[in-house]
Image (cartoon, coloured by chain):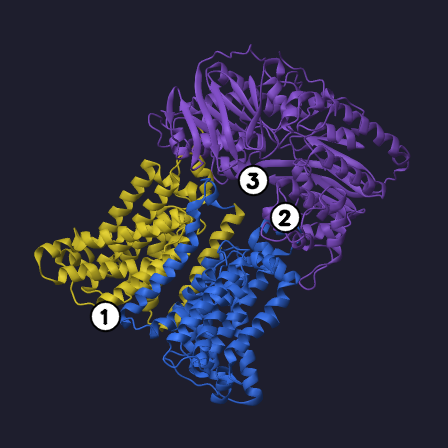
Amino acid sequence: MARTLTTPDVSGLTVQPGALSCSRADFFLSNRGFTVNQTDDVIVRLEGVSKHYGATTALDGVDFACKAGEIHAVLGENGAGKSTLMKLISGVIQPSDGRIFVDGEETPLPTPRAAVERGLVCMFQELSLVPDLSVRENLMLGAPGSGLGRLPGAIVRRAQEVLAQIDGGGIGMGARVADLSLAERQQVEIAKAFARNPRLLILDEATSALNASVVDKVFTLIRAECARGVGVLFISHRFHEIEALADRISIFRNGALVDSFANGAHDYPAIISRMVGQKITDLFPAKPRARPEAQEVLRIDDFGWNGELTDVSITLRKGCITGLGGLDGQGQAAVLQGLFGLLKKTEGGIVLAGQPITLNSPGDAKNPDIGIALVPEDRKTEALILQQSIAANMELAAVGVRGINAEDPALYQPYTDALELKCESLDQPVSQLSGGNQQKVALTKWLALEPRCLLLADPTRGIDVKTKTQIYALLRRLADQGTAILLLSTDYEEFIHLCDETHIFYDGRVVRHLTGDAVTAENILAATLNIPAQQAAHG
Amino acid sequence: MADLLRANRREAIALAVLLALLTVYLVTHPRGMSTYVMTIWANQCLILALAAIAQFFAVIVRGIDLSVGAVMALTNTVASYVLAGSGIGLAGGVVLVLLVGLACGLVNGILVVYGRIQPIVVTLATASVFVGLALLLRPTPGGQINYDFADAMTLDVLGVPTALIITALVIFGFWMPLRRTGLGLGLYAIGSSEQAAFQSGIQVPVIRMASFALGGLFAGLAGLYFSFVTTTGDAGIAPNFTLNAIAAVVLGGVALRGGVGSLIGAVAGAFILKTIGALMFFSGLPPLAQPFVEGLILAAAIAIGGADILRVRNRLEVFGR
Amino acid sequence: MSTRSKRLPDPDTLMPFAGAIVMILGGSLFFPQILGLGYLGQQLQIASFLGVIAMGATVVILLGHIDLSVPWIVGGAAILSTSLAGTGDPVLTALAIPAALVFGAIIGLINGFGVAILRIPSMVWTLAVNSMLLGLAVLNTGGFNPKGEASATMIWMASGTVGGIPTAFALWMLLTALLALFLGRTGFGRYLSSIGYNEKATFLSGVSTPSVIFAAFAIAGLCSAFGGVLLAGYANQAYQSMGDPYLLPTIAAVVIGGTSILGGRGRLLGTVGGVLFITLLTSILSVMQISNAWRSIIFGVIIIVMLLIQTLRRKES
């Protein structure tokens, strides 16, 4: 059954819809008085600002303002210009055209330092933490008032206080950032920004790896800052976060500001259609009847590796999309790696069409006799070579594969057409594409090999709604054509509406195998935390 | 203590290796441990150590300096003209030599920062210029240095080799404080992740410039100390020192990808390299075999350092970050 | 899909050729003999030695690595081939060139092992290999110039002519064409540049990246060894550290030819231009009878200027 877009697109497993609306009500009650008193204190104003990268226009003549004491959410698809806007205001990049005013005065922001000194502090999507330095050193790095000489110790104490408030008190100041988990790094990043005494706080997907209770605490902090008169500029793909937090919502599309309104003025579908520029009714394609008896393509038996995976058995069937879920780092990623020849000394067996096989490299896996493809999670460092052209990227996996002429455009066209890849020419470097289009190139690169078994590591993370629908539709079509698909995801909607069956991981084991009607949000949530289903429903 | 060791594992290993080598050296040396033996050893070590420090400042910000030896040659030839006098003239000479080193570093820095050329390529070209200038000054080795001053710098103070005192001064008087400043932090930040450093508000061009300036200054110091030891000027010393300085930095646990390692490691690496050379001399190996065995030890040390990569159980991990 | 254009020589590739022509014309204003066929032919011959070595270096630099063992692969190959030829034994003489090439390939594989398997930075590992080779040479020759002489074939290859063209130049061009064909036709060239940009993503595309690294260093070793053979043929002897003067000019030639020292971007044709440029620069400076010191200074300055023009041009586009 197709799902109609009437409820917020909740990605992330841990927030329950009920809790959401509640916190939103609280928020409006507690802030009502303040909202009325809001002055027209504009901190930063952009006038006719454009940004071009070569022939690509990332931002086109935008007028935009952030006020003190206001939480301003910015929405838009990938490549709509949101991140470009944030980078302009935080001094990371310079506008090609137009003017930036800070406190009413035209102020160029040539470097992040210049922005920080004016109180414009950004939490970056790509973390601005230096991996080889300790947490303490990172907090002091480039802090306002620091120069080449003495380092400011006070900022570390402030940051520690912030960390303590967002469940990050356990993070050691002497720990190397590279040794922290992604969530801990985001907490440090948040503490670093708050400790810099911002006047305008810019959050670019700053909470994507944090769980719901921490996110709540971060939001509490943000509201407190806002109440002190700090302006907040906020980008998130999680609509419920925006709904809970924002005073004002601005929507960007194709590098232009298309609409700006108070939170609550429009409902979710209306906002989505403004973002996409057209009406999307179905996010997911119709899901066919389950086919548990379909022919087996690939099977792993009692698979284990290095203590991180134990006794995992999964069967992939022709035409089925199998989901792999669980909290981050519970071993599901290792399954994909093991099936792609990336792990040494694995236990158990991989059986392909009844024959045991061993895989010692990705080259083994993509061999047409085996036919396994992996689209890795990290587009920028694993899936693509950003400096090279679209064509070169798409051809790289096919070059040298027996029986394939990698330079034949007909190999790729069906997929680029189905996914509606937007580019000026195939000679364009992949780095110039938006995230969604990059993901399309990464998918095409592997689909061109017509794999029997397609492994996907969270292919829709950080991807806009429209691209998601295109990817979902293509995956379903591939499955219908007989491809076995193994989909690792952090978005449980995908398990419910796209996958035929789902394995939930906890601590290196499959703790639940969900099929048919059992694939519900409650069951997934419970399995994710490895607690019985009833308990979760009550808690 | 355990934490301190873990955080500075690379330096700790280098220092342990150095101590072991030094013990063997002193035991096998026909004259045993004496001030004389220690002084000769320390002098040789210090020259390379200063060159390695110069290289360290390039490597820590993810660069390579192929002009370290050339700056040494240039400053050495300059020194052979200006260090013959005494008193204020001599002091001025020392300052001049160091200024020349600093200027060379700044030239490299300007070309890297504002010319946007890779450090390895810039320094390849400027090395040619610096050696040319050195050759202009001293087409053949010659000149002289104030002997009393040179002796003061290269002998010992109360039985402790002056070179070791200078080493200690550099580490405790210069490096330790520097590491605690914004500049010291910035060096590591740029080397580890330039983008993150920039977004954090670090003035990348200033820090990068400073790293080259410091590199030039220490190459100048190396040239100066070389002058004290040899008391002549020679324009032909460049190639040896450049490559040995890279080897020393790596032996001392400084990662060529930048952001990891310390000046202490670079110094330890230089001392290790020179001690191996010195050990060879008294080892009883046929003299002709010594360069080969030296090369073999260097290669083996590096290979052993790299061998734990073979134990990696995920094939992606070998690609680093 | 059809918008994909065939790659034409880009300005980066053509610049060193233009520079070389400017230099010839400029030099001829002061020294008309520069335009003579004799002089230019001799330059092409001398350029071939650097050219053959730089050809291999380009492959390694495209990969994002560097080969600092060039000096003693060159020297070792020269010593090996002249010692074999110097025996006078016809069989050993015939083996002189193949033995040198095998030597180069083996050292290349050792380089590749350290880089691809042990994952040691190439700058460090090849430096260590170079110092081992130096040690071996000292052990072998006692630190004196080795006895021996070049075989007739070696002399012909280095100093002879074919149809009026210096044989060395003809060989260089032939080898460059063969290598370019190999890089273009087999996907090897594409792998080199992909690894140069992003090794992990290339590996995850199912490319056996270690094999590519091994092959690249083996090719570089072969090229350096062949350069050593040519040099030995030219000098009719081998001598200590005869490879030393070739290391840095090789890198300079590759970089001036538009290849990025960080890997990924670059072309063989550019290296040919870079080699011609550097050879002519060196030669014209010596024709002008300037002292060593000034030659070194001007050489450095001109390389910097070339690189600055490169970056300026790229910034504009």
First in residue order: circle 3 vs circle 2: 3
Q: Position of residue B145 (x, y in %)?
A: 46, 85
Q: Position of residue A109 (x, y in %)?
A: 70, 49
Which mark identifies residue A253?
none
Chain displayed in yellow: C
Give me the chain letter of mark 2.
A
What is the quadrant of the C terminus of chain A in the image? top right
The residue that disc 3 covers is: A54
Chain A, chosen colour in render: purple
Tell me, yes or no, whether the two marked residues, 3 and 2, touch with CB atoms within 8 Å: no
Is residue A435 placed above or below A288 in the rendered structure?
below
The residue that disc 1 covers is: C142
Label 3, label 2: how far apart the Cα atoms are: 29 Å
The residue that disc 2 covers is: A129
Is residue B163 placed above or below B182 in the rendered structure?
below
Q: Nearer the viewer, mark 3 or mark 2?
A: 2
The disc labelled 3 sits on which kind of residue? Answer: Gly
Disc 2 secondary structure class: loop
Label 1, label 3: how far apart the Cα atoms are: 61 Å
Q: Position of residue A483 (x, y in %)?
A: 46, 19
